[in-house]
Image: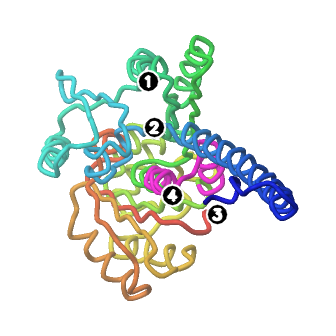
Amino acid sequence: MPAFFAPYGKIGENREKTLTKRNGFAIIVIVFYDKFRETFLFLLFSRTLMNDYEILADASADLDPSLISTGEIGIIPMRYMLGDEEKTCYGTETDEEKRAFYQAERRGEAVKSTQINPETYREIFEPKAKEGRNILYISLSGGLSQTYASSVLEAKELCEKYPQTKIVCVDSVAATVGMGLLAELAAENKRNGMTLEENVAVLEREKYNVCHWFTVNDLDFLKKGGRIPPSLATIGKMLHIKPIMRIDEDGKLGSFNKKIGLKFALNELIRLYDTHSEKKDGEKIRIVHCDCLAFAETVEKAILKINSTAKIEKVLMSPIIGIHVGYDVLGVVHFGNRKA
């Protein structure tokens, strides 16, 4: 017979008192458990809501297409002109398509980039905002383009229209694969359970640790972009001068050194990597090139002698940035001490 059905009497009364105490303790435990479970589920649900956000980046981030196809990172398309034809980059272009662009540059065909207009941001941001989806957008450096400023204005308007939604725009102060490294980091952070706010805090810190070192083969493209005067471009071509360029802490592209001859320029990129990288085991390095794979392979071999554990990817640069720097450009991008 269950204890709470024991017969009355002294023994029964004592047993009843004992059971009452025990039952009272059990009730307290049950109530505490229920409250704990409610609190745990609330925190878990709240965490899930905070982790319910999408990561977006510009098409010029030169990301691994698999990150795009799986939906881990969404893409803001970017447009450019090749001759009289308008083309759109979605970040999933094949190397063959990219090489066709650089072959057109070599032939001297006219190329021109266009900025992402506010309508494009609205077309992509608004459907997500309507659904209550938060957005983390990583943009091309504000020091190189007005895309970041445009995204901030559009995000502000949409957040006022849909107050339940958060749209955070991060100026990467980076370009091409440098922006890509930050987008990859953001995706990894999200997989590890970081909230939107936590992820943004990490990106705002780490973006100043992305190092970009470039050398440009044809100075005419820098001349066209107004980055060097025509007289310097002419003299530089005569003397085979190769500028060494970087993206600085303000996200602006500038020349800070020069070498005579391509061999010395490539050696300088290797030296800069060696000086500024922490050379951690398995560090991510991107060697980005504008249709000059042989140069990229040469630099890759040299870097592996410095850090044999490095995870290096050779990436053919998308047309969006290639328009401004031209063919046969090579860059080494990695995390480290960004200051030149």
Dot 3 or dot 2, earlier in sequence:
2
Q: Are marks 1 and 3 in contact (CB under 8 Å)?
A: no
Look at 60% across and 61% down and name the residue there.
209
Q: CA distance from mark 2 to mark 1?
A: 9 Å
Identify the disc placed on residue 339.
Answer: 3
Q: Going by the image, does 100 lie left or right of 196?
A: left
Marker disc for residue 192: 4
Image location of residue 103, percent across then percent down:
14, 46
Task: Give the extent of the magenta segment.
Answer: 182-206
Of the residues shown, which amino acid type is indicated by label 3?
A: Lys
Whole-number angstrom distance, CA of label 3 to CA of label 4: 30 Å
Where, by quadrant of the figure, is residue 142 drawn? top right
Q: Could you tell me how far apart the alpha carbons at marks 1 and 4 are, in whole angstroms? A: 22 Å
Marked residue nearer the N-terminal end (4 or 2):
2
Q: Amino acid at mark 2?
A: Glu
Q: Is residue 242 above or below residue 157?
A: below
**Residues tagged 2 and 1 counted as in contact (Cβ below 8 A):** yes
Residue 200: where, in percent of width, then height? Answer: 61, 45
State which tag comes first along the sequence, 1 or 3: 1
Q: Which mark is residue 54?
A: 2
Q: Residue at x 58, y 11 (%)?
A: 161
For the residue labelled by badge 1, is the local secondary structure a helix, a strand or a loop? helix
Q: Is residue 8 magenta?
A: no
Which residue is tagged 1? Answer: 128
Q: Nearer the viewer, mark 4 or mark 2?
A: 4
Mark count? 4
Does residue 275 appear left or right of residue 121 in this picture?
Answer: right
Q: Residues within 10 Å of mark 3 (few under 14, many from 20)?
A: few
Element type at mark 3? loop
